[in-house]
Image: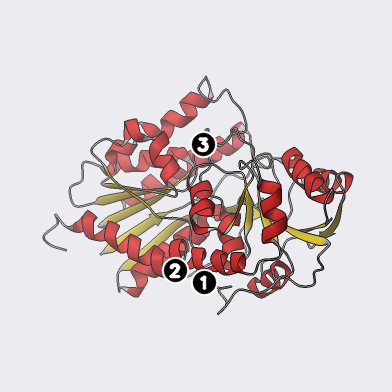
Amino acid sequence: MNIVIVNSSDTFEYRADMVYAYFSKRNHTVTVLSSDFMHIEKKRRQCTKKDYIYLRTIPYKKNISLKRLYSHYRFSRKCIRWLQKKQFDLLYIVIPPNCQSAIAKKYAKCNEVKIVMDIIDMWPESFPSKNTDHFPFRQWGKLRDRNLKYADYIITECDLYQEKLKKFLSGIKVQTIYWSHQDNALPGKAAVATPMTADEIHLCYLGSINHIIDISKIGEIISSIANEKKVVLKIIGGGERKELLISAAEENGATVHDYGKVYDHKTKKEIMDTCHYGLNIMKDTICVGLSMKSVDYLENGLPVINNLPGDMAQIVYKERCGVNISDSDWLDQVLVKSVNSDIRVNALECYRKYFSKDMFETQLKKVVDEVIADSQRW
């Protein structure tokens, strides 16, 4: 097949890379349409990848702004113009941004093109506000919802998204494929947190520190643990709210070690190996069933302290790979399980079961087989 993957955000580039690798390994011709503007760093790309086409994109400075929305819209229009000049068999669209779903509408009537939409995140549902059912947020959501019907198959990053979108998914084949990694950090066995004493709990916070992180809740968690044991918070990441996180942690009794942004898998693992838990704490107003950071924690055999509902809460409960703070005895669990090596083994096994490269490829193969089953020439 001749396959085109559309993904504008470097936030989700790892997903596009894994889809690209899957198809390339099976000798398909694969092209990735991407943006030349990096959302995370807010700058133009300097490095390029094989088979990636980088379309010139309007830059923006703020994560929440009309200019960002307009930049996404212009990128989608450029993708349509590029696709009009090419012939391809399968169109794989990563969402968000929501306006990229309109690309599917353009090609839905072309019988020789199969369309897969991969919903990695939901906006405005993940916006930290309780008023996302009203204008202008609802219009933002409709950019995605009204075009879902044009897909031959829809992938969601968690089951929670299927529940939220169920009235728009009637008659469409849907499959959850969790966020996954290339197993870069996957060790043979789970490490025991070191250094540690019976009087210390070492916590890790990994990733962007932004407006969807519940810093006050993290402070409360630290305060509760600090009443029982010394708390050390190790931060791997950055963001506009980092200083607020550091202040909240210190004010509630933690010693903070700030490692900044770390991209090397070995270095991240070395830091996480010295921690007892990874913090997976977001505001309860957002719609998230699974976070990228939680997958990173589990890949490194690090149990999680979690407040996400849906998929992650169920996985933590079922696989015994962490603690849900919705449990009334969560603090007792944190203290007891911190000295139990079994929970680290459970975390690693949970990653292998749900989030490994092998699991990702098995699930993607199922989707692709079903999408092309009715096409005789393939």
Residue 78 visible in the current orientation:
yes
The disc placed on residue 123 is: 3
Q: Are marks 2 and 3 in contact (CB under 8 Å)?
A: no
Q: Quadrant of the N terminus?
A: bottom left
Classify mark 1: helix, strand or loop: loop
The colour scheme used to paint the residues is secondary structure
Up-down: is 44 above or below 240? below
Horizontal and vertical percent for residue 74? 49, 40
Q: Is residue 110 left or right of residue 343?
A: left
In terms of sequence position, does the residue under pointer 1 or pointer 3 come before the other? 3
User: Could you tell me if the residues under marks 2 and 1 are in contact, i.e. CB atoms within 8 Å?
Assistant: yes
Of the two numbered discs 2 and 3 on the same chain, state the one appearing first in sequence: 3
Residue under circle 1? 183
Return the residue at label 2: 357
Outermost residue toward the left in this view: 376
**Classed neighbour count for the residue bearing mark 1: other residues with Cα under 10 Å, few (<14), some (14–19), many (≥20):** some
Pointer 2 or 1: first along the chain: 1
For mark 2, give the secondary structure: helix
Q: CA distance from mark 2 to mark 1?
A: 6 Å
Amino acid type of the residue tagged 2 in the rendering: Lys
Picture coordinates of residue 44 (x, y %)? 63, 55
Q: What residue do we see at 38% from left, 35% from top?
A: 165
Whole-number angstrom distance, CA of label 2 to CA of label 3: 27 Å
Quadrant for the C terminus, please: bottom left
